[in-house]
Image (spheres, rainbow, N blue to C red):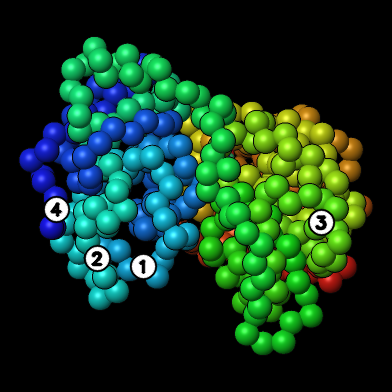
Amino acid sequence: MSGLSWKKKISLALEDGTVLRGMSAGVSGTVTGEFVFNTAMSGYEEVLTDPSYAGQIVTMTSPMIGNTGITREDAESTGVHLSGFVAREIVALPSNHRSRLSLPDYFQERGVVAASGIDTRLLTLRLRDRGVLRGILTTEEHDPVALRKAANEILPISEVDLVGRVASRERMTLFPEGPSSLRVVLIDYGAKASIARFLLGLGIGVTVVPPRTTARQILDDSPDGVILSNGPGDPASLDSEVETIRGLVGRLPLFGICLGHQLLARAVGARTFKLPFGHHGINHPVLDLRDGRVLITSQNHNYAVDPRSLPAGAIRTFESLYDHSLEGLWFREARIYSVQFHPESAPGPHDARSVFSSFHSILLGEDP
Ligand SMILES: NC(=O)CC[C@H](N)C(=O)O
């Protein structure tokens, strides 16, 4: 608990005028972003290190966070990318043989502004009823009038280059342990580490490239397929990324995960739209529209593909059982496969891991 002042007040304000108070569990400072709520009961280390949360302040609905500490082995990237973190109670004393560090000490180490003691039930109901809201989290300002004004001056997430902030800047090839005959290019918009880990586990080599790599450069590299990663922000604002994908469509198998799925859909002419409060959690049921199976999946998105805008040839593969939004696509002719949920399941149940095997089949020229 070193460096932590549980006595320090923290204020939270939303653009709708809501003001809440709590105690700081992280560093002092002011952060702004879009508030979202996450319903996962475990896996906060993966949530903290998932680059897709850049620009967002994440509220955990589970009432006690921090019990299992920080293991460092469960990180999905090398840093914390979300803007701020909120929970009902943040625990400073972990109880877990894998823990290396308490959560408050990790916040100090990583410079995270975090709030404990917030009425997260009220906050979540507000976000559920009014939709995702911009807001501020601060240890420096407590006057409600000033807080409300600041919350209303925050730039919408669609106007911030979040992919540029978290994506990899260098090309790098990872080799699986055993012999491998397949290699894919992973376009990294802020990829979770588990995606490459999974592919390597299937014996597939992975060349990670920055998003600004051109379609020509990727084709000249002659991979067996291309994977479009998860990532932060609004897919509708990523025109140059979509342009690159357009240059790959029909040329080699493509596989999109979350943001990658949304960008792929845009590349073939579909539209994306913002969901009222998104899907963030590890208990999201999706229906496999091909065989009626239900998978419990890990999800983290605020946007979705509009099924009415899909071009001819699109096969809808998965649908959310919460709001019936589109969760997966397959284009047989063009060999494009994509899912809105997270098959790497980190954190989350493992039902959807078979999606990687489906992509493996596509690489081998079979149907998923
Ligand atoms: N996890 C992701 O890839 C998120 C995709 C996108 N930023 C969204 O919020 O919908």
Residue lying farthest to the left in this orientation:
7
Mark 3–mark 4 Cα distance, whole angstroms, equals 48 Å
Give the CA distance from mark 4 to mark 1: 20 Å
The secondary element bearing badge 4 is classed as loop
Whole-percent x, y for residue 207 in the image: 69, 66
Under 8 Å from ligand 1: the CB of mark 3? no
Q: CA distance from mark 2 to mark 4?
A: 13 Å
Displayed quadrant of residue 232:
top right
The image shows a total of numbered marks equal to 4
Q: Which residue is mark 4?
A: 3
Q: Nearer the viewer, mark 4 or mark 1?
A: 4
Local crowd size for mark 1, using a 10 Å CA cut-off: few (<14), some (14–19), many (≥20): some
Q: State whether label 2 is within 8 Å of ligand 1.
A: no
> Which residue type carries mark 3?
Gln
Of the image marks 2 and 4, the number of the one nearer the N terminus? 4
Q: Nearer the viewer, mark 3 or mark 1?
A: 3
Type of amino acid at the residue the image marks with label 4: Gly
Comparing labels 2 and 4, the label whose residue is closer to the camera: 4
Secondary structure, mark 1, is loop
**Quarter the N terminus occupies:** bottom left
Q: Are marks 1 and 2 in contact (CB under 8 Å)?
A: yes
Give the quadrant of ligand 1.
top right
Q: Position of residue 149 (x, y in %)?
A: 32, 14
Q: Determine which residue is flagged by label 1.
A: 72
Name the side, left or right, on which 105 lies relative to 17.
Answer: left
Which labelled disc corresponds to residue 217? 3
